[in-house]
Amino acid sequence: METKFLLKQTLFPANFGILNGNFSTSSASALRPSLNPPATSRRRKLMGTRASVAAVPKVALVRIGTRGRNVIGNNDSPLALAQAYETRDKLMATHSELAEEDAIQIVIIKTTGDKIQSQPLADIGGKGLFTKEIDEALINGEIDIAVHSMKDVPTYLPEKTVLPCNLPREDVRDAFISLGSASLAELPAGSTIGTASLRRKSQILHRYPSLNVLENFRGNVQTRLRKLNEGVVQATLLALAGLKRLNMTENVTSILSMDDMLPAVAQGAIGIACRSNDDKMAEYLASLNHEETRLAVACERAFLLALDGSCRTPIAGYACRDEDGNCIFKGLVASPDGTRVLETSRQGPYAYEDMMLMGKDAGNELLSRAGPGFFDLVEIVSLSIFLDDLPGQCVCERLWVYRVIVSITLEERRWVYRVIVSITLEPTPTLAF
């Protein structure tokens, strides 16, 4: 008998409207502290039209102001909402003044990553796609806290913001989900795996070159499981941390080992930001900080920074504490097609300065081993695919591409010039090389 995956609705009442596609920004007023997840979960088959399993606005911000109300803002996915509620509940449990009615409010903020679903993440801007609008609302005083998945946070935080808190990290591994195979190794040759992650794609193709990868496999967890049910792909990979936070682990076929799939930098970690001049909120958040997670994330992000990594570059990294209390770090960088994968590891004291140096040193090593043309190749493959697929009338998007490629190669006249002049739309006069 064919297996169908189940969608658990654990965050909202049945008539709330987010999961059935009827959500609007006015629905944000329904997200109040008094709205608690139902005690029992309701299940339904993961089937239906695209509209019936629409993307949900993401939530992750908190406000403290003269009104005595704290506002948490986030994007619209069920996972982001789960993270916002986790943050709210921890604040209420730790600080009695925040446990009062209406002390914390959750609001919805639509991000660029939510709005653009037709292109792979690597082709529309990389990191910051799911955080930019939320951070802007934070800086402008519209919200007081921004709750982010740390893997989505750019290596440089926006000005006027600080991130004083990482919540305890969830399981960092990736989950394999399939209707007909027990593992990646058991998928028949020619099978298609759906993933929007270049990191996952490159590692899959490196170890299993007989498999195919559908890159633009976008959407929230529920949407991806529906596509799997419909036969769009034969398997997919999802972060186990997200499935646990959504109480959807019954969908997992198997869990990938670190040898099969090294996780994304900061995968499974939640970061909570506030304004740099908001000392009171910074104190609230610091009281929730999990130091072991903070140090591991700092090490991994130092590695990413050394590589100048983004979602356009297949990079993986993971730091953890071993049985002796030391830090173990593993990292890799790969070509998008998986033909070339460079790996490294480090071990040292589990202390901030030591771990930052470990991450930086590991990144510099791979940068040196990769050679000067390696990252050019990664960028030109991603950008050329994006430009080829982009309709000619999308002038704004094309100008955005010009801005990006100019900014990353401003001082060196490399392949970028050839890419720009080969496009049918004339470059703007301000773009001089």
Image (cartoon, rainbow, N blue to C red):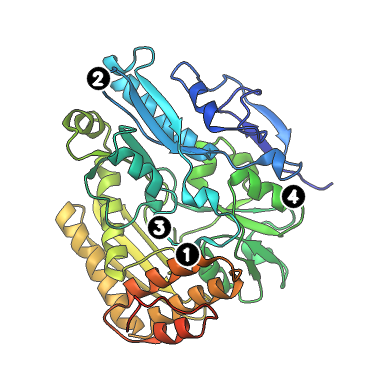
Q: Give residue 84's position: percent from left, percent from top.
A: 42, 33
Q: Nearer the viewer, mark 4 or mark 1?
A: 4
Q: Nearer the viewer, mark 2 or mark 3?
A: 2
Q: Indicate which disc residue 259 carries.
A: 1
Label 4 element class: helix
Q: CA distance from mark 3 to mark 1?
A: 25 Å
**Residue 279 visible here:** yes
Label 3, on which residue?
127
Label 1 element class: loop
Q: Give residue 204's position: percent from left, percent from top.
A: 56, 68
Which of the two labelled residues, at mark 3 and mark 1, occupies the earlier sequence position? 3
Label 2, on which residue?
66
User: In the rendered structure, which amino acid carries the disc numbered 1?
Assistant: Asp
| Observer-nearest of 125 and 362 | 125
Label 2 element class: loop
Q: Residue at x 77, y 52 (%)?
A: 230
Q: CA distance from mark 4 to mark 1?
A: 28 Å
Q: Is residue 288 above or below residue 214?
A: above
Q: Are marks 4 and 3 in contact (CB under 8 Å)?
A: no
Horizontally, residue 174 falls left or right of residue 157, namely: right
Which of the two labelled residues, at mark 4 and mark 3, occupies the earlier sequence position? 3
